[in-house]
């Protein structure tokens, strides 16, 4: 189409020139003359800079046209400006500019040099399990053509299929030692190296690193020494807890030399930086088959003296008292055995004194229509408490959503209490305004928690034991790593935690319990209830300026 337009423009231009040259004149027709200062140009790939050609002609008008959309022309006086767009291709390109004056014309041959060759390969290193895999590698070059060379020794176990901008590698299973190959993508004078590493076939079973807090160097060194390769690493991420996205600790994924467990995954806890869980996935075996292969005996030989296979539950379990790790093996949905090594949490540095009995605070207010915000204020002020903060309902301004009190010294070490009222439920067109949640705060952090590191807390063993005696059961970790407990007899859900609030205890670490009445039907693990409570805990933190 561009060629037709070019020829059409040429024909029209020549016709105009011929007609003008044939017009009768007093001294007869004058033959058109045309000369150019140059009939060839070489332009750089950068483009953008105008190249000038001087045009000499006896015609009053002349014109010029390019046959390529990347080459532009402009006419001014007896000068012709030629401008090229940048050439990003790895090859030279050519075009022509036709200059027409009357019935005569001249061509200018234009060459624009190629851009520097670019070769991009992704990924440049891949790690393969000993069971073999198929991998895709992207290869892009502005020169168009490229080739791939494979080490001669590796051609026996790497089969390649090359597409336009992709390589498919089929890696065979490896029954021997760990192996490595080099592949070379080439385009022009450029070459990119691709490394392929494949784990070997080592011992039947493997054990992870039993270190509760290994450094990155220690963990990688341990696995590499056993013939493993690091496949991927993810750094710790704080997440967005207020939006329900929990923080995630750093993780490692290795391809191992085990014939049964081709991969191992380590995950650290975000808050404590301790190993949280280690996971192996068996290659094609379910839990029963794994036991038949001798995995229970292997565990017993390596410190898990109480390891056993429970056929009724289809579970393998055991613990190692030397390193406090435990193991649980169960089938996935695909009937493949998944081995979880659960790491112990950080050891509490010393014993802490907790409450003599569980502090239910004023949870007796729950469900009683008497305890509205007005009644609560009356009772707290009469007890010597000071109202520190009150937040009114935006729609019903006479009905507070929230009240925070500083307690009288006689209640020490409890220092503060906050109430949250039900202003969503209406009665006769007005909010019921009854007590819905309570947040109790003690200035003595160690009544229920201890500081693992700055602004990171765990519940004390003593407080957890008190919870169990009182009939509370653990339900779930919240998005911030705190723990949600449920007491069926009391119909009460709580979130106890160590925390620092800007608004209370002078911003120092304190122990807090958020109390919620469980009023929904169904299981205590009802996800809607859990989500609602997690959202409310986050809202309490916002109101009190949690650090």
Image: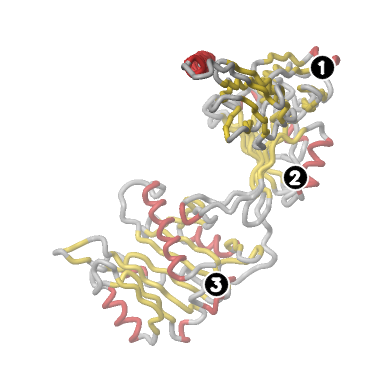
C-alpha separation, residue under disc 3 versus residue under disc 1: 62 Å
Q: Nearer the viewer, residue 171 or 538?
A: 171
Label number found at residue 510? 3
Tell me how the rendering is colored: secondary structure
**Residue lying furthest front in this view?**
26
Q: CA distance from mark 3 to mark 2?
A: 33 Å
User: Mark 1 — residue?
Assistant: 154
Label located before the other in sequence (1 or 2): 1
In the rendered structure, the answer to whether residue 300 lies left or right of residue 497 reads right
Give the number of the disc on residue 210: 2
Q: Nearer the viewer, mark 3 or mark 1?
A: 1
Say few, some or many: other residues with alpha carbon within 10 Å of mark 1 (under 14 / 14 to 19 / 20 or more): some
Q: Is residue 44 above or below residue 351?
A: above
Relative image position of residue 312 (x, y in whole percent): 53, 29
Mark whose residue sits in front, 1 or 2? 1
The answer to whether marks 3 and 2 mark residues whose Cβ atoms lie closer than 8 Å is: no
Q: Provide the secondary structure element on which disc 1 rests.
A: helix
- The x, y position of residue 468, in whole percent, is 51, 58
**Where residue 217 is drawn, which disc sits there?**
none
Q: Nearer the viewer, residue 395 or 286?
A: 395
């Amino acid at each position: 189409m561009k060629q037709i337009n070019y020829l059409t423009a040429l024909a029209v231009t020549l016709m105009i020139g011929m007609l003008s040259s044939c017009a009768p004149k007093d001294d007869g027709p004058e033959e058109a003359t045309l000369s150019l200062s140059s009939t060839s140009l070489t332009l750089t790939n950068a483009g953008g800079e105008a190249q000038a050609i001087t045009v000499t002609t006896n015609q009053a008008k002349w014109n010029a046209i390019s046959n390529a959309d990347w080459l532009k022309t402009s006419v001014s006086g007896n000068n012709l400006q030629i401008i090229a767009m940048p050439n990003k291709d790895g090859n030279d390109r050519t075009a022509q500019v036709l200059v027409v004056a009357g019935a005569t014309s001249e061509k200018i041959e234009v060459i624009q040099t190629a851009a520097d060759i670019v070769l991009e390969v992704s990924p440049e290193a891949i790690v393969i399990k000993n069971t073999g895999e198929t991998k895709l590698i992207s290869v892009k070059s502005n020169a168009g053509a490229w080739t791939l060379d494979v080490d001669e020794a590796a051609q026996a176990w790497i089969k390649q299929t090359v597409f336009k901008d992709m390589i498919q590698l089929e890696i065979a299973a490896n029954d021997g030692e760990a192996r490595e190959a080099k592949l070379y993508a080439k385009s022009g004078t450029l070459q990119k190296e691709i490394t392929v590493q494949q784990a070997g076939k080592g011992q039947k079973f493997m054990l992870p690193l039993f270190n509760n807090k290994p450094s990155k160097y220690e963990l990688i060194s341990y696995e590499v020494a056993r013939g493993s390769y690091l496949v991927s690493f993810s750094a710790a991420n704080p997440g967005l807890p207020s939006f329900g996205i929990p923080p995630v600790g750093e993780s490692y994924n290795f391809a191992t030399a085990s014939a049964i467990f081709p991969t191992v995954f380590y995950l650290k806890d975000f808050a404590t930086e301790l190993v949280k869980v280690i996971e192996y996935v068996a290659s094609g075996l379910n839990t029963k088959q794994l036991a038949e292969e001798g995995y229970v005996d292997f565990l017993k030989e390596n410190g898990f003296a109480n390891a056993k296979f429970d056929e009724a539950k289809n579970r393998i379990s055991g613990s190692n008292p030397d390193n406090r790790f435990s193991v649980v093996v169960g089938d996935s949905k695909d009937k493949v055995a998944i081995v979880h090594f659960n790491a112990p949490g950080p050891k509490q540095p010393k014993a802490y004194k907790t409450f003599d009995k569980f502090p239910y605070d004023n949870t007796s207010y729950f469900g009683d229509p008497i305890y509205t915000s007005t009644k609560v204020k009356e009772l707290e002020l009469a007890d010597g408490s000071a109202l520190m903060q009150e937040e009114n309902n935006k729609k019903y301004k006479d009905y507070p959503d929230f009240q925070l009190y500083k307690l009288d010294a006689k209640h020490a070490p409890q220092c503060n209490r906050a109430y949250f009222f039900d202003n969503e439920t209406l009665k006769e067109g007005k909010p019921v305004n009854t007590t819905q949640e309570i947040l109790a705060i003690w200035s003595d952090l160690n009544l229920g928690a201890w500081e693992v590191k700055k602004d990171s807390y765990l519940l004390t063993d003593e407080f957890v034991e008190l919870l169990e005696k009182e009939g509370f059961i653990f339900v779930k970790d919240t998005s911030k790593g705190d723990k949600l407990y449920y007491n069926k007899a009391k119909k009460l859900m709580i979130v106890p935690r160590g925390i620092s609030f800007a608004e209370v205890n002078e911003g120092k670490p304190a122990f807090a319990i958020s109390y919620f009445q469980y009023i929904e039907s169904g299981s205590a693990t009802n996800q809607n209830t859990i989500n609602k409570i997690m959202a409310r805990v986050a809202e309490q933190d916002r109101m009190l300026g949690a650090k």
